[in-house]
Image: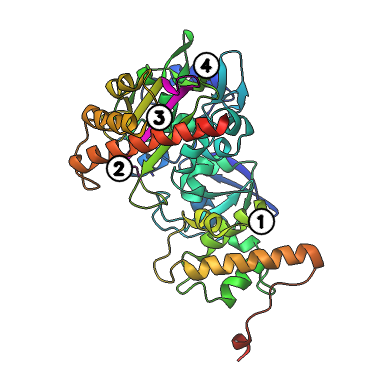
């Protein structure tokens, strides 16, 4: 068995799991964090994306034992339900998700991007999301949302203001 | 995944000892982007997986008296961001950027890409064009060999049982050599190369001629290969569009592509001609920029 001690969403968690357990299985089945999704299970779709020590990775391609002692952020750790994280808020405001299956992975890829690059170009956003497949919404609205979230986060740093205000129609 | 025993190495010496102890069926785990996929699908799951991902002496990029030494565990993202790489061999950052997607570049390692040794690997051509060597540790010590000799066949390297790839060395003579890498895939993200090509050359400033040209072709032979006849056609020859186009046509005859569901052999051969010409032009542009 692999004895693990991992910082998950700011909280130290321990587990004892068989060596063949992936980080994804550890999060979903042992810690009950089902935000990271099991999609292709071979690193193509990005639905399992989580942030490990600041890097977006496919949780299906990491053994739980390899995450021992590291810091993991999942979608559950991004923000409480209210208020949402500015990236989540931008995805909601811009209708950037339909079924939502790819959403946690996409949003964590966007977070890893913006943490290191607060003002990315469209090409950089596309590059950052290239490992996250969406089969219903498409990518245009996601790219818009990441751009808006970047502005909101930059604004936060400058003024301490909240996330970008939603467009007028969203209040209807 | 079927059950296996997991052992972890502290450093490369410990890894070699564990490789010897557990015999030839042990599989080495670094970034996991290839191995975990194999472990999930393969019928013959190994009894033992050796996790080397925490072996500190296999990490890091440094200039040594031999050249630029890149530890086998250095990830593609680390290569893209390394100031040493961007200064001395920026083509390696270009090539790393074409691999997979952010998530797999954050996990996957240079050593892993070379050891998996698929013909379409994106790390190989630029390294071959820069005459890179690899350092291999084994029970009898460390040996170094040219990367071109490390590639033996599809998914087959020159690693003997008990040996571990520890580092990639770009020789001092190649640091700063103008070099370019071009990949042709069916999409920009997460696509395997139909063909990839690297070209390097020094440009003699007096005669404006090619010196020590190198052309490396990927995905068109059992391993990454050089195109020696195309290189010979350029040696000492003036830098002209005609010379580069001719080298492309010769390289196309040196490729041994196959037809598969991604592309036909004829299409790949045509791509070799075009990409070789463009890669040479890009390397020359880099030489101009450096002047």
Q: Is residue B107 above or below residue A106?
A: above
Q: Which mark is residue A9?
A: 1
Please say whether residue B64 is one of the residues in the magenta stretch.
no
Question: In the rendered structure, the residue with mark 3 lies on which chain?
Answer: B
Please say whether residue B206 is one of the residues in the magenta stretch.
yes
Q: Is residue B216 above or below residue A8?
A: above
Check chain identity for marks 1 and 3: say if they share one: no
Question: In the rendered structure, the residue with mark 1 lies on which chain?
Answer: A
State which mark lies toward you, 4 or 2.
4
State which mark lies toward you, 1 or 2.
2
The structure residue drawn at horizontal position 63% and vertical position 86%, both measured from the top left corner, is: A168
Circle 2 packing at 10 Å, graded few (<14), some (14-19), many (20+), is many
Please state which of residues B266 and B249 is positioned toward the viewer in this rendering: B249
User: Residue A15, image x and y in percent?
Assistant: 59, 47
Residue range highlighted in magenta = B192-211
Left or right position of B38 against B10: left
- Res A45 → quadrant: bottom left
Kind of element beneath mark 1: loop
- The residue under label 3 is B199
Question: In the rendered structure, the residue with mark 2 lies on which chain?
Answer: B
| Residue ranking furthest to the front | B206
- The residue under label 2 is B194
- The residue under label 4 is B173
- Predominant secondary structure in magenta? strand
Q: Which mark is residue B155?
A: none
- Total labels drawn: 4
């Amino acid at each position: 068995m692999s004895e693990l001690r991992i910082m998950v969403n700011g909280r130290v968690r321990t587990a004892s799991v068989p060596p063949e357990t992936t980080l994804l299985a550890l999060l979903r089945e042992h810690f009950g964090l089902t935000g990271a999704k099991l999609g292709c299970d071979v690193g193509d779709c990005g639905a399992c994306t989580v942030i490990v020590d600041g890097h977006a990775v496919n949780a299906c391609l990491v053994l739980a034992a390899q995450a021992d002692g590291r810091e993991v952020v999942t979608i559950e750790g991004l923000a409480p339900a209210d208020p949402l994280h500015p990236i989540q808020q931008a995805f909601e405001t811009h209708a950037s998700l339909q079924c939502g299956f790819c959403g946690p992975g996409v949003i964590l890829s966007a977070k890893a991007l913006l943490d290191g690059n607060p003002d990315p170009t469209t090409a950089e956003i596309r590059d950052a999301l290239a490992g996250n497949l969406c089969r219903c919404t498409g990518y245009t609205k996601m790219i818009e949302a990441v751009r808006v979230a970047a502005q909101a986060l930059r604004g936060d740093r400058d003024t301490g203001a909240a996330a970008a205000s939603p467009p007028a129609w969203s209040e209807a | 995944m079927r059950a296996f025993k997991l052992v972890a190495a502290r450093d490369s010496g410990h890894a070699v000892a564990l490789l010897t102890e557990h015999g030839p069926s042990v599989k080495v785990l670094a970034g996991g982007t290839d191995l975990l996929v194999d472990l999930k699908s393969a019928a013959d799951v190994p009894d033992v997986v050796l996790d080397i991902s925490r072996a500190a002496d296999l990490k890091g990029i440094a200039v040594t008296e031999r050249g630029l030494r890149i530890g086998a565990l250095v990830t593609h993202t680390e290569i893209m961001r390394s100031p040493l790489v961007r200064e001395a061999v920026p083509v390696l950052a270009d090539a790393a950027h074409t691999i997979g997607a952010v998530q797999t570049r954050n996990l996957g390692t240079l050593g892993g890409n070379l050891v998996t040794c698929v013909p379409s690997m994106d790390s190989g051509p630029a390294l071959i064009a820069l005459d890179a060597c690899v350092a291999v540790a084994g029970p009898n010590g460390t040996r170094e060999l040219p990367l071109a000799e490390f590639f033996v066949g599809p998914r087959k390297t020159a690693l003997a049982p008990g040996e571990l790839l520890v580092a990639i060395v770009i020789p001092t003579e190649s640091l700063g050599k103008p070099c370019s890498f071009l990949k042709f895939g069916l999409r920009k993200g997460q696509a395997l190369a139909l063909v990839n090509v690297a070209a390097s050359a020094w440009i003699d400033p007096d005669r404006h001629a090619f010196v020590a040209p190198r052309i490396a072709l990927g995905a068109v032979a059992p391993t990454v290969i050089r195109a020696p006849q195309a290189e010979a056609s350029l040696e000492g020859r003036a830098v002209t569009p005609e010379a580069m186009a001719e080298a492309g046509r010769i390289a196309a005859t040196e490729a041994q592509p196959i037809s598969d569901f991604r592309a036909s052999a004829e299409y790949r051969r045509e791509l070799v001609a075009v990409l070789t010409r463009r890669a040479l032009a890009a390397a020359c542009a880099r030489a101009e920029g450096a002047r």
